Image (tube, coloured by chain):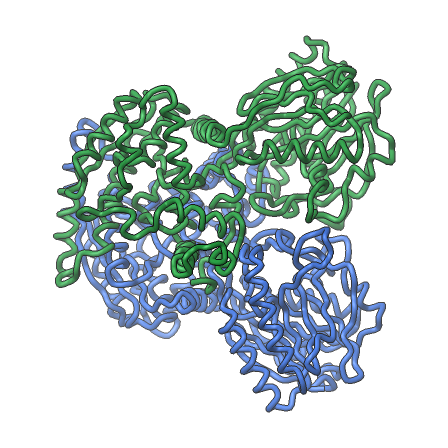
Chain colours: A blue, B green
Amino acid sequence: MKIAIAQLNYHVGNFDGNQQKMVEAVNQAKEAGADMICFSELATCAYPPRDFLEFDDFIKLSDRVIEKLKELSTDIAIVVGAPTRNSEIEGKDLYNSVFFLYEGKVQAVQHKTLLPTYDIFDEYRYFEPASTYQLAEFKGKRIALTVCEDIWNIGNENPLYTICPLDELIKQDPDFVINVSASPFNFNKSSERIKMLKANIECYGLPMFYINHIGAQTEIIFDGGSIVMSPNGNVFREMDFFKESIEYFDLEEVQKGETISKQETDKIRDIHNALVLGVKDYFDKLGFKKAILGLSGGIDSAVTAALACAALGPENVTGLLMPSEFSSDHSVNDAQILADNLGMISETLAIKDIYSQYLNTLDPLFKGTEFNVTEENLQARIRGALLMAMSNKFGHILLNTTNKSEMAVGYGTLYGDLCGGLSVIGDVYKMDVYALARYINRDKELIPDNSITKPPSAELRPNQKDSDSLPDYKKLDQILVFYIENRKSPAEIISLGYDEELVKRILRLVNLNEFKRYQTAPVLRVSSKAFGMGRRMPIVAKYLT
Amino acid sequence: MKIAIAQLNYHVGNFDGNQQKMVEAVNQAKEAGADMICFSELATCAYPPRDFLEFDDFIKLSDRVIEKLKELSTDIAIVVGAPTRNSEIEGKDLYNSVFFLYEGKVQAVQHKTLLPTYDIFDEYRYFEPASTYQLAEFKGKRIALTVCEDIWNIGNENPLYTICPLDELIKQDPDFVINVSASPFNFNKSSERIKMLKANIECYGLPMFYINHIGAQTEIIFDGGSIVMSPNGNVFREMDFFKESIEYFDLEEVQKGETISKQETDKIRDIHNALVLGVKDYFDKLGFKKAILGLSGGIDSAVTAALACAALGPENVTGLLMPSEFSSDHSVNDAQILADNLGMISETLAIKDIYSQYLNTLDPLFKGTEFNVTEENLQARIRGALLMAMSNKFGHILLNTTNKSEMAVGYGTLYGDLCGGLSVIGDVYKMDVYALARYINRDKELIPDNSITKPPSAELRPNQKDSDSLPDYKKLDQILVFYIENRKSPAEIISLGYDEELVKRILRLVNLNEFKRYQTAPVLRVSSKAFGMGRRMPIVAKYLT
């Protein structure tokens, strides 16, 4: 039996586009003589459709795609994920389902049992869990159909659910398992997936076909890397990361159990490639081509510019230099060299005159007050307004250049440097931004060495350095990971050898600055805990503040 | 048996403050000779604690409050909601529980079964549903303990859950039902609650004590209105809305079934009072006193100013007038009269010179382009920057004045008039903003009549009117309600008699402007579907766009 895995890049709500992709894949698979083709979870509408699922019209449009695929399934079986209606009055109105289509008919529909509702996932918001289980039968084989999370409740110390759907399906004696997934990237995910699949094989001893989504949907990046597992626990094939592809597998070969290929992971390279895909899809799927960003001569804007150029082509990326009276010569030079190295467009607008005029206008109310964070923020807001003016006039999307360390402690100006339609490196801690810069420079110096080695500064007052108000970034990043990723208490972090006052100050800053993060752009997610939809904190609270 | 209901205003994560409130209430109830006192759902940590629930340290602090209340329960029973740990390895790590404390011991703990996971609710993100049921026994009575949603799955045409926990509890023959709730306000909620309670009484025939939370937590406003129901289906007492209070009920009296009091609802008055509480708690709980907002002379800023003055006192509210070359004289007059009528502080800063300086600075890049939305946005952004400069310098929180109709169609400038720490009327459609203005003027003209009657205008270019680019607000609001609140399709809305092109244009604007709403302040929620955490839409999508 020849099985095709179609690892495709869908677009939320773009039913025509998604259908066309799937129709082309089906036709290609037919030509290749495949018996079956498998698409990923909720492929009709793309994952995650979020509250569009509450619109009956949206579900109807998904139904139409299934109808079309059903028609095409005359001489090939099609496995595809889609939302379906719950015909019972009680319970949620929808299921998250996988269809088995063949001979122009729905041969089987299996609903998802385990509904991820944590981090970025909200599935119990929409879906009723499955309560019945049915194999698909095809050409003498019995196939267990599962959807993503259904196979993740195994091999964990602290399982999230009280049941494993394969424990039910296995009773019906399947020959192999198909899992349609939409499993997002984070820099640990690939190894977790293989561990989880091995745990399933150990338990059930069946070949598994794991079909993942590839492509970015706003902030969530799906990396592909679909996997075929042999029943002896070997990885038969791990498909490419960050690429659409269709591959064919002979079930008999898979059953033999030799490893054909396996990919190496590399945290920084993988983050780089994920972010490039994230930027590219954000623009492509919104129908935009051109990006703008502020170039300060610092490392954050340099890395963001390099990622944007890789995603969109340097001819579509404009860097705006906006020096002030506090900008050093080297900053302007470094920014200009960067733009030249990358081949992107650069423009310069000095903010001095606008800044002076703001101070004049405010003078009647500010008379007698001292220069403080107000005037620093004002400079950042002038830059934000100039970038947005360019964006409005010429149709760019403004890219935000804030890193995760700054975003965590609120080191940034709301409506100033926190402006932008997309936060490119907002899930990358400062130390990893340095590593990304070195990765970008792996073949030649694109980012000026000076931007990497000089002490970071916001340059909003004379001789300012980040280290004036923030601890060493290495230590800061470590404390932030303990709190944000690992949800440790202050006492636990202090017990690891960090200074008590420092820990309390940092955690307080994180919690006091929820209001800023609430109003910043969606952040491309590359870690297991990014700011945004996956981390839901109250703004008004009194905990560690 | 004398039962106290404590309808209190808690503060998320403020364990000391919440404990102190409850200790005082227990002492007061003891003095009043009560046998039992009931607090609301998750009263130890306040509702909703959101992802703080993932911090073990946070749960420990809640445990300590329960320990303290246990100590106090020597001669009074205490019913209180709190998170508890799930001792099973499988399933979510927490339960949402209600404790029955007496004689210094935990007499019973009942976990919540029905976990609301829709709109603003995320409970299955954190909690495992109950699977066992146990009554509390106290002074010869058997008490069924339930938590909020547990009693809401009855009397609905399309119930969300497949079980009703009271069906289990009733088998153990209880004498009455206690429900600890955190049930947020919307302008239909009070009548829904009474309908739901009557449906429960009809089914189970027992007296019910429904204890609600009062107070705002960031965007969510809890209105109190705790209810005691007699077993004949009469409302024995509905406690005050928007007020903390402790009341005492004699179980024997409740059983007799006479209605003692019932409150009238009034949509606009209730929205007004909810928003005043929402503003007040946002400031009080963050530890701020002073608000600033831009006064344009229009109705939105006028209503926002009046609400802020009612919440914070006019001496704590500053209105900033920021006329431009496009501002009409009447705008400036109307704004000044409003400030004088309300007794608030007002200041004026003209934006002309800053605006000219921006145009000068941008001229090398903008030469040859036409005046368009760029220059309109620039004016709005200058105003945003001036307001934020005042806020930074003098410690105000900036209030956002955008209404729900504008926010829906993206009629507002990101980082301009969409600035602000809190959106006061962002869940109030324009027609209801008019009604609020009339309500505010019910005794005397606080908002100048001219602000109410003149055609709305952003005044960002000569002779601009909202009606140049938007339909009549009455029609706009109706179409928006069909789409946003009722999730109707374009075809359904058109079939109700609305112009096809208009409907498609409006729905397209709603969907294209998700990116703006993503970056705006938390919106005080007064309807069943507010923008913000209760409405989760992808930014990158192709549906009705």
Q: Nearer the viewer, residue A146 or A530?
A: A146
Tell me residue A195's x, y (percent).
68, 66
Tell me residue A234's x, y (percent).
71, 76
User: Which quadrant of the rendered structure holds the C terminus of chain B?
Assistant: bottom left
Which residue is at a point 38% across and 66% down the rendered structure image?
A307
Where B533 sits versus A7, above or below?
Answer: above
In this figure, what is the number of numbered marks? 0
Residue B291: quadrant of the picture: top left
Would you say A178 lies left or right of B203 here? left
Can residue A233 be seen at all in this image of the molecule? yes
Where B92 sits versus A87, above or below?
Answer: above
Q: Nearer the viewer, residue A527 or B423?
A: B423
Can residue A503 be seen at all in this image of the molecule? no
Would you say B81 lies left or right of A429 here? right
Would you say B108 lies left or right of A357 here? right
Residue A209: quadrant of the picture: bottom right
Which residue is at a point 37% across and 56% down the rendered structure image?
A421
Q: Nearer the viewer, residue A72 or A257?
A: A72
Q: Nearer the viewer, residue A265 or A294?
A: A294
User: Which quadrant of the rendered structure holds the N terminus of chain B?
Assistant: top right
Tell me residue B57's x, y (percent).
61, 37
Where A375 sits versus B414, above or below?
Answer: above
Tell me residue B436's x, y (percent).
40, 31
Residue A469: quadrant of the picture: top left
